[in-house]
Amino acid sequence: MAVTVEPMRDDDWPAVRAIYEQGIATGDATFDTEAPDWEAWDRGHLERCRLAARADGEVVGWAALSPVQRKSAYRGAAEGSVYVAARLRKTGVGRLLSEALIAASEDTGIWTLEGWIFPENRASLELCDQLGFRIVGVRERIGARDGRWRDVVVVERRSARVG
């Protein structure tokens, strides 16, 4: 199956939301317990660097950036999110999206990508390590989900091209 990555379109939202809900259901992808509506998701993500992975025209994954801070000094830092349809996890779609997100972020002037990953999400941590992210710390008991306090591993990747 050939997978391509291209800019996300507004009409991709139903598929993007469904894939996000699959990630939520794992319990190890996000603190969110339900997907937002389009308007809330749109407000929370940068307009640039919204990507969709497609196989045979179907959205099978997505990646997007969120601002880490609204202050202008942080305009080149963003938090990345990457989600893959459950049936295609561990097939390389996440890597393809991540590599495309890194390239797109650098093309738009982002010099630091950040991620907050549950320690139990070993696959995401391993992929980040392979893509040049480094662990900058662990936020212990930073939030609770389903009545359980959770840690997150904070990773970042500094661009060699920007900044």
Image (cartoon, rainbow, N blue to C red):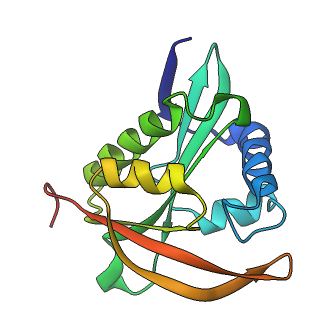
User: Which of 64 and 39 lies nearest the eye of the viewer?
Assistant: 64
Image quadrant where one finds the C terminus? bottom left
Residue at the spot 53% in from the left edge and 47% down from the top edge: 63
Q: Position of residue 61 (x, y in %)?
A: 61, 37
Residue at the spot 63% in from the left edge and 13% down from the top edge: 56
Q: Along the horizontal axis of the image, is 17 left or right of 137?
A: right
Q: Is residue 47 visible?
A: no
Q: Is residue 102 visible?
A: yes
User: Which of 155 and 63 lies nearest the eye of the viewer?
Assistant: 155
Against 10, residue 4 (above or below) is above
Q: Position of residue 136 (x, y in %)?
A: 34, 77
Q: Position of residue 76 (x, y in %)?
A: 30, 70
Q: Along the horizontal axis of the image, is 144 left or right of 78?
A: right
Q: Quadrant of residue 152?
A: bottom right
Q: Quadrant of residue 29?
A: bottom right
Q: Position of residue 42 (x, y in %)?
A: 66, 60
